[in-house]
Amino acid sequence: MTRLFNDPTAFADEALDGFVAAHRRWVRPVTGGVVRAGATPAGQVAVVIGGGSGHYPAFSGLVGRGLAHGAAVGNVFASPSAQQIRSVARAAHGGAGVLLMYGNYAGDVLHFGQAAERLTGEGVEARTFAVTDDISSAGPEETAKRRGIAGDLPVFKAAAAAAERGLPLDDVLAVAERANARTRSFGIAFSGCTLPGADHPLFTVAQARMAVGLGIHGEPGIGEEPLPTADEAARLLVTSLLAELPDDVEGPDRQRAAVILNGLGSVKYEELFVVYRTVAELLTDAGVEIVDPEVGELVTSFDMAGISLTLTWLDDDLEALWRAPADAPAFRKGALGTPEPVRAEPVIAEETDDLAVPEGSDASRRAAAVVLDALDALAATVDAHVGELGRIDAVAGDGDHGIGMQRGSTAARRAAVDTHALGAGAGTVLVRAADAWADKAGGTSGALWGSMLRAIGTALGDEDAPTAARVADGVRQASAAVRRLGGAEVGDKTMVDVLVPFADTLAAATAEGVPLADAWDRAAGAAEAAAAATADLLPRKGRARPHAEKSLGTPDAGAHSLSLITRAVHGVLNDHIGEAI
């Protein structure tokens, strides 16, 4: 378990601070993560990688010459926010564009995509690419749905080495696509990991059993088998990967492959070498030429006891890129010339909008006070249920929903208080709260809650006292924004299963002339029923999808948290009956 920490919510930030202090020869800090200690050479594409904390040496440990130009680092098992990614990308940009690379998880897809849109709008050419190497997370006919696990490393390495050659952005992207198409990974685990501050692991494996097909966010495997010997584990890993070759690889005989045997956190190096002994023998017997193998901890999951095997099938160009020199804190290969001088400028301050806010009308400022009470109730509800939300999420996911909601709601409340003190109306207070939630929470829920609050705030505005109809319209727009951004619909076992009936019921009630508090009560009842009903659904989106059967009988964590919040806000509206909102 994770034993050494202070405040669990500060763990990721404090770990990054310590990492930077220990590796100033390679990296310097910027808001949202790290970049190379020296500037990106003018005219070179910047490869910016990223993801949640808890996977060291991914992602910050892979920043250095020959590898990434920067890494955006999110909270524990949560994607960095779009603002963090944008900040790192701007600091790393050398004038030739930016390739944003990450593992294929919903939160990363959302936030990296939003960052790319913002960068493009600011004149920085940006592309995104998600690694999809985990064969256990989807079938060969659905490779786009696969997770990115330890295959992140060879795909990142190929793209970064291509950038070092001076290739243009689209060509660097094409290299990443080719490397990803030729990369496959498969993993097993003997116990789950424990998040900082938690008193139990995210999943457990029975004595003398192992989980097969695990992820790297503490998700359970897709099945269990008897505990193997080291040789049996090696045979399972090798045969699983040789059973699915890339389309342009006819057979393993006379093929070359980059090989990574990855430890996930608490399997010791000597154990890895015992397994690799047989991995190498089996691959050689199959006719595979092993090229520059890596054995060690490269993409971890805190203290998870597990291993994964990655094969990247090489052509001449991919082999040259894999062998190319690199010098990063946690990955070194070959020899590079004299490094660029370390830049000594201070940490880049977080870019924020002008603190000045449009002055709200008296009526809107009074409504903003009600909004503050609602955000208070929201944050208190999350605090009271944070453990429960984490346990629900851990049934088939990574168990971080509670702590992510806590980070987001706390940041939103703080931003709302500051904004209201500047004289803002209800709309601006909610919009600033939305941005703070998305930035501090990261992950899928951070992006979705940010979009929800922003939609409602935009609908309320700062001029007039919000009417029940305007509130209902804002919630309706929030529902549309979440479905558009997240791609989920009713029946996918997500928060959308609650948000849609809540919005529809609220709209119908207010259209009938029902007062807001009563209409909200009716809608909160619909939300509660819908949240309970998600227990009977199989997930079709997000990290829970590969473990669909495990989630039967358990409601979706995002749906449940939303239903709890709608009921808490109803209490606030009841307390303010007859006031401006």
Image: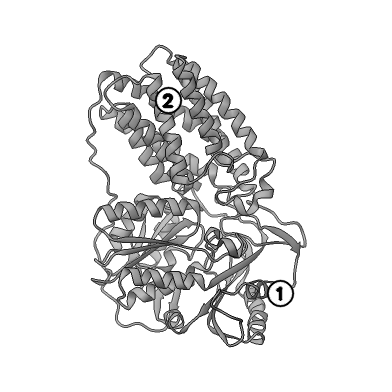
On the image, the x and y values in percent for residue 48 come to 37, 63
Compared to residue 25, the image places residue 551 above or below, namely above
Residue at image position (34%, 29%) is 459
On the image, the x and y values in percent for residue 506 come to 48, 24
User: Which residue extends farthest top?
Assistant: 578
Q: Which quarter of the rendered picture does the N terminus lie within?
A: bottom right
- Secondary structure at numbered mark 1: helix
Compared to residue 86, the image places residue 165 above or below, namely below
The residue where tag 1 is placed is 230
Give residue 472's mark.
Answer: 2
Give residue 147's mark.
Answer: none
Residue toward you, 404 or 133: 133
Query: How far separated are the C-alphas under marks 1 and 2?
Result: 59 Å
Compared to residue 240, the image places residue 502 above or below, namely above
Residue contact between numbered discs 1 and 2, judged by CB atoms under 8 Å: no
Which numbered mark, 1 or 2, is in the foreground of this view? 2
The answer to whether residue 79 of the structure is visible from this angle is no
Q: Amino acid at mark 2?
A: Ala
Residue at image position (31%, 51%) is 118
Residue toward you, 5 or 40: 40
Asked whether, in this view, residue 274 is left or right of residue 465, the answer is right
The answer to whether residue 119 of the structure is visible from this angle is yes
